[in-house]
Image: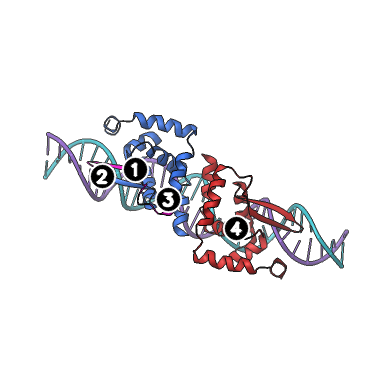
Chain colours: A blue, B red, C purple, D cyan
Amino acid sequence: MRDLIKIFKALSDRNRLRILKMLEIKPLCVCEITEVLQLAASTVSKHLSLLRDVNLIMDEKEGKWVNYRLNRQEADKYVKKLLPEMILWLSSDPTILKDRDKVKSVDRHKICSG
Amino acid sequence: MRDLIKIFKALSDRNRLRILKMLEIKPLCVCEITEVLQLAASTVSKHLSLLRDVNLIMDEKEGKWVNYRLNRQEADKYVKKLLPEMILWLSSDPTILKDRDKVKSVDRHKICSG
DNA sequence: TCTACATTTCGACAGTTAACGAAATGATCT
DNA sequence: AGATCATTTCGTTAACTGTCGAAATGTAGA
């Protein structure tokens, strides 16, 4: 029961849902997500580690960046069931749509160091 | 997005999950649920009104009792998708199994006024 | 109407959580 | 090695949440 509760808690936050919906489009690094959400980097990092703890996302190092992406493979049965639903949900939410536009145009080389 | 977050929040609590799993067996009144969960009646009442607010459950007056049951009909698309999943989940959780035994033997006439 | 009891509402308190900035860590490049 | 930048960790603060008991509400029956 504890695992399931942790997954629901992870999904109970507006910004974490926005992150998941952004990662549907493509893997992103922390600074790209920070740029879209307009939150402190430390806050975004914390959200990401929480999402990773419940196996909703995975991380992968690439040079000085850490790319995060949805975990569609090694997830447990709850995540395997919930992640595909999330893709169907919120697809017409105004905030999600705006985030999607921003994600498509972000370039980490411009945003993160500049 | 707000509605979905509220549903996930409702599902993020151990005692609310226990309530939902109990209601899978049969409709129950507040005092029966209170007896199984061993919480204050006011706490149980609050959990139930929260679950009702997000359309996971419905209430129905029956004399001095209020029966609560799962909402399988008028629920929105999120609840319609999540409730059937919940039935598959947690079915071997020790606490859920104990609760199930208790629910099957509770009798509101003995428990509530006695 | 009065009593009994199921339920809900209210007020208070403890524990949790999301947010920030500052400091620490890790990696790349000169 | 030192500089730079992305990321994480830490400490703090404000807001939220689950819990309780007491009081209020609503219903059934004497």
Three-letter residue code for mark 4: Glu
> In the image, are marks 3 and 4 on the same chain?
no
Tell me, yes or no, whether the two marked residues, 3 and 4, touch with CB atoms within 8 Å.
Answer: no
Q: Residue at x 44, y 57 (%)?
A: A3
Visible residue check, residue B38: no
| Residue designated by label 3 | A79
> What stretch of residues is rendered in magenta?
A61-80
Tell me, yes or no, whether the two marked residues, 4 and 1, touch with CB atoms within 8 Å.
Answer: no
Chain under label 1?
A
| Residue designated by label 1 | A69
Give the image location of residue C24, x and y in percent: 25, 50
Chain under label 3?
A
| Residue designated by label 2 | A61
Q: Is residue B82 magenta?
A: no
> In the image, are marks 4 and 2 on the same chain?
no
Three-letter residue code for mark 2: Lys
Three-letter residue code for mark 1: Arg
Q: Does residue A95 sit above or below D9 in this rendering?
A: above
Chain under label 4?
B
* Secondary structure under the numbered disc 3 in the rendered image: helix
Q: Earlier in the sequence, mark 3 or mark 1?
A: 1
Q: CA distance from mark 3 to mark 1?
A: 14 Å
* Secondary structure under the numbered disc 2 in the rendered image: strand
Quadrant, the C terminus of chain A: top left
